[in-house]
Image (cartoon, grey):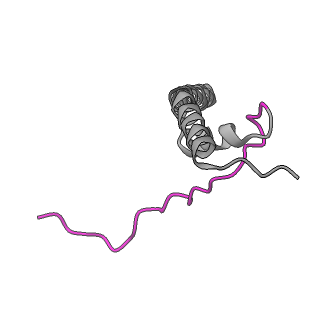
Amino acid sequence: MAKKTGSKPPTAAKKKLARSKSNRVLLGVMGGIAEYFNMDPMHIRLAWWAFVFITALAAGAVVYALVPTVLTLLAVAYLVAFLLMNEAPSK
């Protein structure tokens, strides 16, 4: 059986998420994320823009689906109000 030594392995420096000073396009946010995860910053930037594009399309699809429904409901509500309301008396 191997004998354990009393020395501890050197601890790795604690990672800190911060903006990059060397890998910047605008403010270094994506570069800092890439440095934190030891990745290529271009992959982080591409993933970010893919996320933005997909969520924008999804939001646009939801609005596209809801607008006709909302407009129909508003038109029906207006028609119901027209039928239920009496005309104001003339002075």
Residue shown at 73% from the left, 43% from the top: 20
Q: How many marks?
A: 0
Return the x and y of residue 56 as percentages of the image width and height.
59, 29
Majority secondary structure of magenta residues: loop
Where residue 84 sits: x, y (%)?
Answer: 58, 48
Is 31 placed above or below 49 here? below
Q: Nearer the viewer, residue 63 or 53?
A: 63
Q: Give the x, y percent position of residue 9.
A: 41, 63
For residue 43, side relative to residue 87 (left or right): left
Looking at the image, residue 28 lies above or below residue 50 = below
Instruction: Specify the segment rendered in magenta.
Output: 1-25
- Tell me: residue 19, above or below residue 56: below
8 magenta-colored = yes
For residue 77, which quarter of the picture? top right
Residue 16 lies in magenta, yes or no? yes
Where, quadrant-wise, is the N terminus in this rendering?
bottom left
Query: Which of 28 and 77 lies nearest the eye of the viewer?
Result: 77
Asked if 44 appears above or below 7 in the picture, the reply is: above
Q: Residue at x 76, y 51 (%)?
A: 88
Identity of the residue furthest to the bottom in this view: 6
